[in-house]
Amino acid sequence: GVDTAVEKICRSCTNCQIVGQQSKPEPLRIRQLPTAPWVHLSMDFLGPLPNGKYVFVLVDLYSRFVVAELMTNTTSAEVIRRLKKIFTQMGLPHVLQADNAKNFSSQELKDYCVDYGIKLMHTTPYWPSANGEVERQNRSFLKVMKISQLEGSDLEEAMQQYLYMYSLTPHSVTGVAPATLMHGRRFRDLVPHLQEEAIFDEEMRDRDLTIKHNTKENRDKRVGAKESSIGVGDTVLMKNMQPQNKLSPGFLPTPGKVVHRYGSTATVETATGQQYKRNVAHLKELQQPPAAEVDQREPESIDSPPFISGQQDQQAVAGYSRQRREIVLPKRFEDYLLQ
């Protein structure tokens, strides 16, 4: 109807779409546990700290075991040097995951991973939750550093003390201490234990999956998550991730076309051929104005009425005149001839 057509035209206003709100996030996707410890690692940097140093954080996604190093510079060469040191003690992983920072996406690091048979994966730009485990560790480290700063204690000593307590404490998701899952044995500490507890991988996986399902349901309900219909071939607007001021539009004015989609990540190509990886929550399908409908029916011919003369003319006029009530003469006029 007319209402639907008007609504489509209003929704297809390009400028309105550019300054409009972004789409709701998709439902949370549950990541399966790796097959064993030290198979899939996630890395990131925290800092700079007040002393000018950075914390290089490496997290095993199976056991949640954390390795951390204080670094003065964060170049790719220094990252590789620290990785070699850690891998000498722990062995080589199968997958190494990081964000899209220059030191993690350099050709030098890519070549190192190829030489040692490590698959280097990069998360979706501007979507920190894709590297959620290491981001959570960064928040914990930051809290420890703030407390250390207030107490005036040594930052490196505070970090090592935190790692010791964290590694020996049962994890809230797996129910097992990260160090125990990582090394297959309970680490001795100052707390006495009656007996060694066996580690059951299947039980730990069930617990991990149950908690992830509960987290997913609560999060999806809280944010009103909705599956995105964006697919390959769709024309989309990309969210403006670096607004200059309050008047900057929410989306970039230059549209692009989706050329690939995997899960919640889509690859968008602009008219210049440049490609961007974005989470679908940062994309909005561009509504095109409806095509104008052209009436192809032949116009009805309007013929002039035929010429009517004489009595026919009077009858025609009478026929087109307003209906009148029948006139009945009173009886007293029956004997008279009225003109």
Image: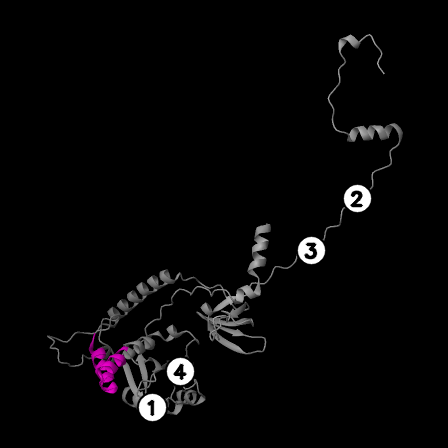
Can you tell which quarter of the image residue 215 is in?
A: bottom left
Residue 186 percent location from the top left of the image: 18, 79
Q: Nearer the viewer, residue 324 or 214?
A: 324
Residue indicated by mark 4 = 119
Q: Which of the two discs, 2 and 1, sits closer to the camera?
A: 1
- Going from N to C along the chain, the mark reached first, 4 or 3, is 4
- Going from N to C along the chain, the mark reached first, 3 or 1, is 1
Residue 206 percent location from the top left of the image: 27, 67
Magenta: predominant secondary structure element?
Answer: helix
- Going from N to C along the chain, the mark reached first, 2 or 1, is 1
Binning the other alpha carbons within 10 Å of mark 1 as few (below 14), some (14 to 19) or many (20 upward) gives few
Residue 61 shows up from this direction: no
Identified by mark 1, the residue type is Thr
Q: Nearer the viewer, residue 175 or 56?
A: 56
How many angstroms separate mark 1 from mark 4 (CA)? 27 Å
How many angstroms separate mark 2 from mark 1 (CA)? 90 Å
Identified by mark 4, the residue type is Lys
Q: Secondary structure at mark 1?
A: loop
Residue indicated by mark 3 = 294
The magenta region covers 143-169
Q: Which of the two discs, 3 and 1, sits closer to the camera?
A: 1
Measuring 39% from the left and 90% from the top, which residue is drawn there? 75
Q: Is residue 38 magenta?
A: no
Residue 302's mark? 2
